[in-house]
Image: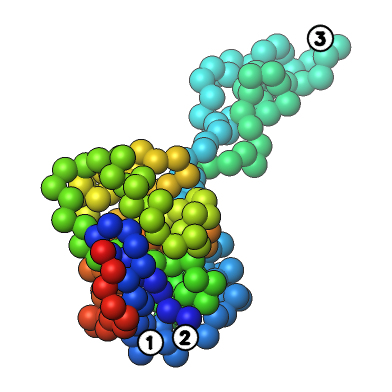
Amino acid sequence: MAAHLLSKTGKASGTAAMGADLEAQAIKPHLIHEAVTAEMAWRRAGTHSTKTRSNVSGGGAKPWRQKGTGRARAGSNRSPIWTGGGVVFGPHPRSYGGKVNRKALRQAFRSALRAHVERGTIAVMKPTGWDEPSTRTAAEYLSKAPDALAARPLLVVVSEYSSPVALSFRNLRGIRVLEARDTETVDLMAGRSVLVEHEVWDRWNGAAAAVAGEDAE
């Protein structure tokens, strides 16, 4: 299998060859799982916070004297056992990210790409030549694309998020547009189909992708 190559109108016009690394990459589910778990953890804000008894305002005076009242002794009304008191073992700002080797992350990314190639759910866009954003043009483009790209959600990977191509696709339902530098393994796995700009595909392959087949406009 190979990635579909789409002409500027959206029709299949051949195949985009894979680079040597992607061609030799075996699909490794355990690495994909490790990468996706880590990337989702890294995206967590980790900004939740609670106040301990030392952070809660008030509580400077002893509520009542130590003896003679018949009540349990108490040193502060900010104690965790009091309403409005501090929180014991509550969450505090932290990072959820762990460590994954860079080599493993690269293999996981290539594995996710290879999985899409094997399923036939990835396509490469030739330069469209669109001068201005047009949602209608993007919809017509997809209507002529191979049936495998009808699966949603569709991930569209572009080299620049503010380009006419990116702006054209991002208003369509079930489509997510990302820049290549922001795309991770979890994004590839979240998309049931993937559409990649030719420039990005070349970058991911590490060399210019060869084209097989005849052009069909």
Residue in front for this viewpoint, 71 or 189: 189
Q: Between label 3 and label 2, give the one nearer the viewer.
A: 2
- The residue at the point 63 percent across, 19 percent down is 84
Q: Residue furthest right?
A: 70
- The residue at the point 36 percent across, 67 percent down is 12
Q: Amino acid at mark 1?
A: Asp
Residue in front for this viewpoint, 44 or 26: 26
Give the CA distance from mark 1 to mark 3: 79 Å
214 over 154 or under it: above or below: below
Q: Secondary structure at mark 2?
A: loop
Numbered badge on residue 25: 2
Numbered badge on residue 21: 1
User: How far across and how far down the image is residue 115, in percent?
Assistant: 52, 74
Residue in front for this viewpoint, 144 or 169: 144
- The residue at the point 32 percent across, 71 percent down is 13
Q: Secondary structure at mark 3?
A: loop
Q: Are marks 1 and 2 in contact (CB under 8 Å)?
A: yes
Precedes in sequence: disc 1 or disc 3 = 1
The residue indicated by pointer 3 is: 69
Is any atom of residue 157 visible in this view?
Answer: no
